[in-house]
Image (tube, helix red, strand yellow):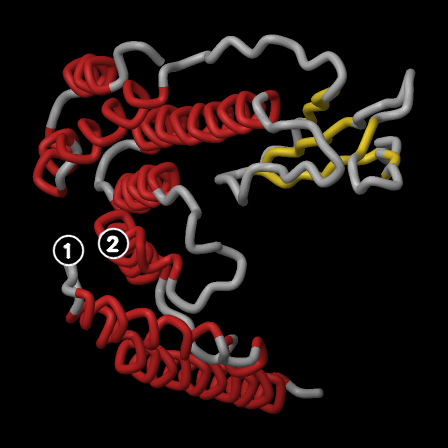
Amino acid sequence: MNKKRLYYTILSAVIIIGIGVFYVHTQRQKNFAKTREVFAPIYTYSGELTPEQQKEYANLAESFMNVSPDVAKKYRLPQREQLALEAHTMTLYRDNPEMLLMGQESFPADTDVKPYQRHFGLLALIAKTKLADMPAGSRKLMIQHLESLNKSLVKNSVETYIEKITDIPLGPNPKLPPHAFGIQTSGIIGADQWIMEADGSFHFPEGGKHGVVHITDVYGKEYTVDLDSPADTEMTEVTTELYSKIDHLFEKLTDEEIQRLSTLSKTERTEAIEKLFPSL
């Protein structure tokens, strides 16, 4: 192949590749535009919503959840816009945790939404921190602190649940406490059956076992509660104090405060972060 033909071959390949890249980029921008249009209604909701607005938003969120995975793949946003949407959505659920109970079978009506409320607040702060224009090391440090608080929420939920288990009355049909934040349970396993007498009363067989309850948290840590000899559970952190700490942090870490942190020197920013998370 002579030099002239080689030149035109390379030039043709570059042009074809360029056209292909341009086409892919154009299609991606079109998809981004469509996605922005689809998610735009979410931004019309903010703060504490009225019952009617909560219902409207819950229906909107459900419509997104019902989209098939194949279709959902087509609706993507650039990473920063995705994080901004996540921060806005998590803040909405933080401000309106009762929306969890609307049409969601996995959340019974008596579900305690308070830990979920704090969880959503932390997720919103994590998304905002990822968006922050500050050195990666500072972002990583803040995210670690925020995730540590989320782990404290889960541990607190486990310990509270174990306390409730130890208080359930043992009988023919013992009922475990309802669904709790951040954990899954096996139910009561290995229990011996109560014996029903002719008069309709029940008695427990001598030497029988009331069974155990296995608990697994979202981080994969396992706990076992023996109903015959439950261990005393000492709360690691008082629930009200933990919630108060997270609420204060959410109110303190506004968009303006995160922006201010990004303008500080490395030493000043490190000191400011330590003040935000004094006990972590």
Q: Secondary structure at mark 1?
A: loop
Quadrant showing the N terminus: bottom right
Front position in the image: 52 or 277: 52
Work out whether 262 lies above or below 276: below
Indicate the amino acid at tag 1.
Glu
Image check: 201 left or right of 129? right
Q: In the rendered image, is residue 60 in sight?
A: yes
For image coordinates 14% across by 21% down, the residue present is 265
Q: Residue 177 at x, y = what percent?
A: 56, 37
Q: Is residue 187 above or below residue 272?
A: below
- Residue 20, given in percent of the width and then of the height, sits at 49, 85
Q: Secondary structure at mark 2?
A: loop
As drawn, the residue found furthest toward the front would be: 199
Q: Position of residue 73 (x, y in %)?
A: 52, 75
Total numbered circles: 2
Q: In the rendering, which numbered label is found on residue 96?
A: 2
Read off the residue under disc 1.
48
Label 1: how many residues lie within 10 Å, few (<14), some (14-19) or many (20+)?
A: some
